[in-house]
Amino acid sequence: MSDEEEDYMSDAFLSKLQDVKPGISMVRRVKEAMKKETQQKETNVKNRQKTFKEQEKESRETALQNSICNQNKGFALLQKMGYKAGQGLGKEGGGRVDPIPLNIKTDRGGIGMEEVKKRKAEEELENYRQKARAKQQNETKSLEDFRSRVRTEREERKIEGDLRRSQRACEQLDSQKGITVPREDWYWPKAETDDEEDDLKEEEEEEEEKEEEIVELTSFDKLQILTSYLRGVHFYCIWCGTTYNDEEDLCSNCPGDTAADHE
């Protein structure tokens, strides 16, 4: 290392550097700038010329703070009639003491416009509440209708299932007793036939319907009739799944003749 080059690790090199504390000078400059800006805003506010409305407002407030002097004609008339300063109006002095306050109208609406707006707002709010209540009622009704429909469909599927079970049991029990033809066609399950036989049967049924009016039974009616037949002839209950010895045994041990009795 040459003599002309200074060692950057030596005290001589470090003593020449300026001691700068990071962040202090920057904070000071920011504070000074903010102070100058605030002073400038205050100066602008003081030097700004007031508008006509501002001057009118200041003069009105100043006048309202001062009481009416004796030179006022209206006040002079009141004094002639016996009025004294600070006394209430009226014969007995029980009326208003302070003057009627001023309500300066700033908008361009006519007299009564605020009442009309208020009434319209109340009507709109009431209409909104009615619509909300009607919507809630419709949703509740729709939900109840949906639940009722689902419950009805479930009950119908259960009835149809019980009817099919009763038909199979009826066919089996009738066959055990040597009965080859059911009392009614729907007492036994519908047998699978060929298409030609189905067509012939449909034609025969159509002719019969033309000749006489046939009352169509519902699945619930068929189930009631068939269960009565099974209980009365075969002493059998589809919900118990048991063939009893006689009618007395059936009545003693079976809860009832409906599915609800067996739940």
Image (tube, helix red, strand yellow):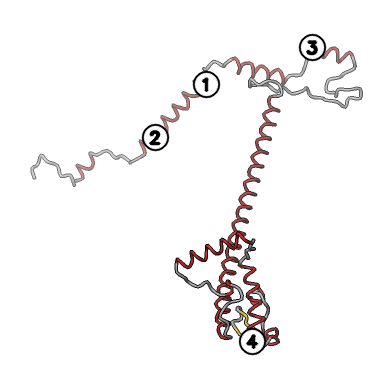
Of 14 and 168, which appears nearest the observer? 168
- Amino acid on which disc 1 is placed: Val
Q: Residues within 10 Å of mark 2 (few under 14, many from 20)?
A: few
Res 45 label:
1
Q: Circle 3 — which element?
A: loop
Q: Earlier in the sequence, mark 3 or mark 2?
A: 2
| Spatial CA span between label 4 and label 1 | 108 Å
Q: Circle 1 — which element?
A: helix
Which residue is tagged 4? 244
Which residue is tagged 2? 28
> From what the image shows, is residue 93 above or below residue 80?
below
For this orientation, the residue located farthest to the right is: 92
If the image is split into quadrants, where does the N terminus sit?
top left
- Amino acid on which disc 3 is placed: Asn
Residue positioned 82% across, 14% down in the render: 75
- Amino acid on which disc 2 is placed: Arg
| Spatial CA span between label 4 and label 2 | 107 Å
Residue 224: x %, y % from top left: 65, 72
Q: Earlier in the sequence, mark 1 or mark 3?
A: 1
Q: Circle 2 — which element?
A: helix
Q: Are marks 4 and 3 in contact (CB under 8 Å)?
A: no
Q: Earlier in the sequence, mark 4 or mark 2?
A: 2
> From what the image shows, is residue 132 above or below residue 205?
above
- Say left or right for 81 vs 238: right
| Spatial CA span between label 1 and label 3 | 37 Å
Q: Quadrant of residue 73?
A: top right
Residue positioned 23% across, 41% down in the render: 15
Res 108 label:
none
Residue positioned 10% across, 39% down in the render: 4
